[in-house]
Image: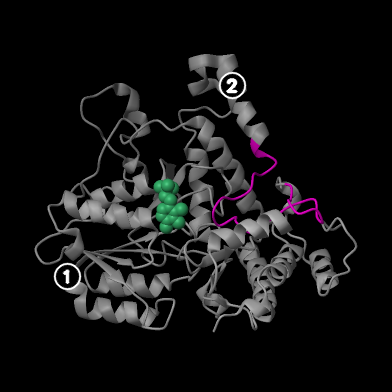
Amino acid sequence: MSNTGAEPTRPGEAEAVRLDATDPGHRHLFHLPPADGGRYPEAAYLAGNSLGLQPRATRGELLADLDAWSRLGVEGHLEADRPWLPYHELLTAPAARLVGALPTETVVMNSLTVNLHLLMVSFYRPVGERNRIVIEDSAFPSDSYAVRSQARFHGLNPDRAVVRLTPRPGEDTLRTEDVTAFLATEGHTVALVLLGGVNYLTGELMDIPAITAAGRAAGAVVGWDLAHAAGNVVLSLHDWDVDFAAWCSYKYLNSGPGALAGVFVHERHHGDEALPRFEGWWSTAATTRFEMAPVSRPPATVDAWQISNPPIFAMGPVRTSLELFDSVGMPALRERSLRLTGYLERLLDEVTVGRPLTVITPREPHRRGSQLSVRIGAGSANELTKRLRHEHGVIADAREPDVVRFAPVPLYSTYHDCWRVADALAATVSVAEVPR
Ligand SMILES: *Cc1c(COP(=O)(O)O)cnc(C)c1O
């Protein structure tokens, strides 16, 4: 069973089809966009790191929640098949398994940047010279804006309070030893370390336990943005002693555009009354919620960071997706991700020869997830991805000016998709164009 839609006759294509037969993944559980370009019916979708595809199960789950509302009205809070009042608790355990946490340490709520702010209310507490926030220079802009606005909120100059870590000259990614060395020497000025677990641009997977340990040893709080790590790599947030983390659910977690996001707060911070938190009626313990008391009594779990009653129709897609991750399991997904990404790397190594294309993602499999970023030496990234899509049905993601990202997602991407990437690049970027 292959999705080629044509006899595999082009160089290397038969090998890709063969690999798909032996290592099939779970593509049948997803809707694939149709392809432009004619030769194949389905898109080669390599943009799951930007927006994951729709699981086939999602529509039915959403309709069931809509039906409950139409049948029950307000009584759905208690009488829906999945009652709305405790609905978020259905997500807690699978979210915890996904990131290697205790169920009391994870909650699904809000969106990513909102959660980063709510967590910084608690965990960015500048005092005296210990007032800086460490991010990576290639941080996702939303994170950059968030930490700068937090510095300003505390009356600090963001140009001084925000430290942006840069790779060594001539290198594209950060070295763990440079991050830990910085923390060893400058750590006494750092209030918060807030890095991306997997960098959105380069695809670099940071050494989360080593950097967390170095930051905490320096007396800083260490939080992680796991937007590109959750559902991509195996995480052990509890054992790694991470203070807090946040992630979105619309990239590798396939829960739909703008989906509800996830939060982790290590249990050592639970019930700490000295930590400031913003509160609402969902911050108080569920058993006290309808006492309508003037003062909250938050539980000693991450649920204390909730504020509002959650949007039920947005929770169904996250629940559906997390069930899928539970049924396949992160370790198995990571294994397949290593195989697929390694295969794509091998093909890119062939196609980049003589072409103005460079893979900037780390070469070591343990330093990356399911993404390979390619820097183009001529033309614009946007133009290239447009041509890949319209001429070849290959959907990738451009980050102007010069990076194109390809993510072979282990749940639904295929070897044949990877082959189509290389085939399309070979046809689109000509060897003769090389400036140099
Ligand atoms: C995708 C992404 C975001 C997006 O933020 P939203 O609040 O979900 O809009 C933020 N940070 C990082 C690192 C991301 O990869």
Where does the image place residue 335, in percent across and percent down from the top left? Answer: 65, 69
The picture quadrant where one finds residue 175 is: bottom left
Camera-side residue of 388 and 241: 388
Answer with left or right where residue 171 lies relative to residue 214. right
Q: Which mark is in front, 2 or 1?
A: 1
The picture quadrant where one finds residue 305 is: top left
Where does the image place residue 366, in percent across and percent down from the top left? Answer: 53, 76
Disc on the earlier residue, 2 or 1: 2
**What residue is pinned by disc 1?**
189
Q: CA distance from mark 2 to mark 1?
A: 53 Å
**Segment tinted magenta in the rendering:** 34-58
Q: Is residue 334 above or below residue 210?
A: above
Where does the image place residue 242, in percent across and percent down from the top left? Answer: 36, 63
**Type of amino acid under label 1:** Thr
Element carrying mark 2:
helix
**What residue is pinned by disc 2?**
68
